[in-house]
Image: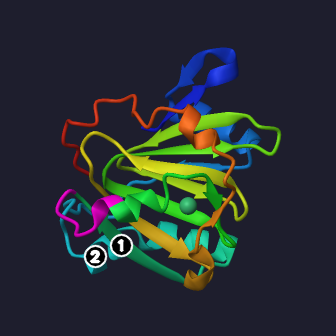
């Protein structure tokens, strides 16, 4: 389940409905998905996409997404640190950032236009949808791996635009949950 820190209120939200309700107040969609049939975390991408086809098609119709793929990032990924360095500074995209987590963990920080920062830790089963233009940054957790389905309206729109606010430097890129424990979908 996702973990959301509400910094102003000094509380943490972990149950799925509360996470979804709170994030919706921030304009962020959260869902929890289960596969139509069992899949392993290292199943081929086609099998993963097939297992979540119903959810993917529903979201495509909702958000105008045209393609879906599966991304794998882990400690063995060549150039991992330089890849992560592109996304751990505050940025936005010209299209929605849609991620469904299959394996591993990640930490999004989202900042509202009023300046409120919300850390959101995601794990397998979590779907998160940041609308285009949302200020955010992303870090891996201690397990340094993530496998996720991505949905795109237009892949070329996914280039990061940096705010250069420096706000990201005020927040520790440290996850909250037990991310060193291997989790399987
Ligand atoms: Fe991003």
Q: 170 or 55, which is in the foreground?
A: 170
Q: Is residue 121 left or right of residue 117?
A: left
The reply to whether residue 17 is visible in this rendering is no
Tell me what residue is drawn at x 51 percent, y 83 percent. Answer: 67
Between discs 2 and 1, the one toward the N terminus: 2
Q: Is residue 173 above or below residue 136?
A: above
Q: Disc 2 to disc 1, how far (Cα)?
A: 6 Å
Tell me what residue is drawn at x 73 percent, y 34 percent. Answer: 116
Q: Is residue 47 left or right of residue 110?
A: left
Magenta stretch: includes residue 167: no
Q: Which mark is residue 102?
A: none
The reply to whether residue 127 is visible in this rendering is yes
Corner quadrant of residue 34 = bottom left
| Residue position marked by numbered label 2 in the rendering | 45
Mark 1: which secondary structure?
strand
Q: 74 or 170, which is in the foreground?
A: 170
Tell me what residue is drawn at x 63 percent, y 58 percent. Answer: 91
Residue 165 in the image, given as x and y percentages of width and height: 69, 47
Residue 65 in the image, given as x and y percentages of width and height: 61, 78
| Residue position marked by numbered label 1 in the rendering | 70
Q: Residue furthest top?
A: 10
Q: Main secondary structure of the magenta part?
A: loop
Segment tinted magenta in the rendering: 75-81
């Amino acid at each position: 389940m996702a973990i959301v820190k509400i910094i102003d209120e000094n509380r943490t939200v972990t149950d799925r409905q509360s996470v979804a309700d709170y994030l919706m107040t921030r304009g962020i969609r959260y869902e929890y998905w289960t596969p139509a049939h069992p899949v392993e975390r290292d199943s081929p991408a086609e099998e993963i996409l097939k297992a979540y086809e119903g959810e993917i098609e529903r979201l495509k119709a909702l958000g105008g997404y045209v393609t879906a793929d599966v991304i794998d990032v882990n400690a063995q990924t060549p150039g991992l640190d330089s890849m992560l360095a592109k996304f751990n500074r505050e940025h936005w995209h010209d299209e929605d950032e849609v991620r469904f987590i299959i394996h591993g963990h990640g930490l999004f920080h989202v900042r509202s236009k009023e300046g409120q920062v919300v850390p959101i830790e995601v794990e397998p089963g979590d779907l998160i949808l940041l609308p285009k233009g949302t200020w955010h940054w992303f870090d891996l957790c201690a397990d340094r791996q993530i496998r996720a389905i991505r949905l795109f309206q237009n892949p070329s729109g996914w280039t990061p635009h940096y705010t250069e606010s420096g706000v990201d430097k005020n927040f520790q890129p440290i996850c909250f949950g037990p991310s060193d424990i291997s989790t399987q979908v």
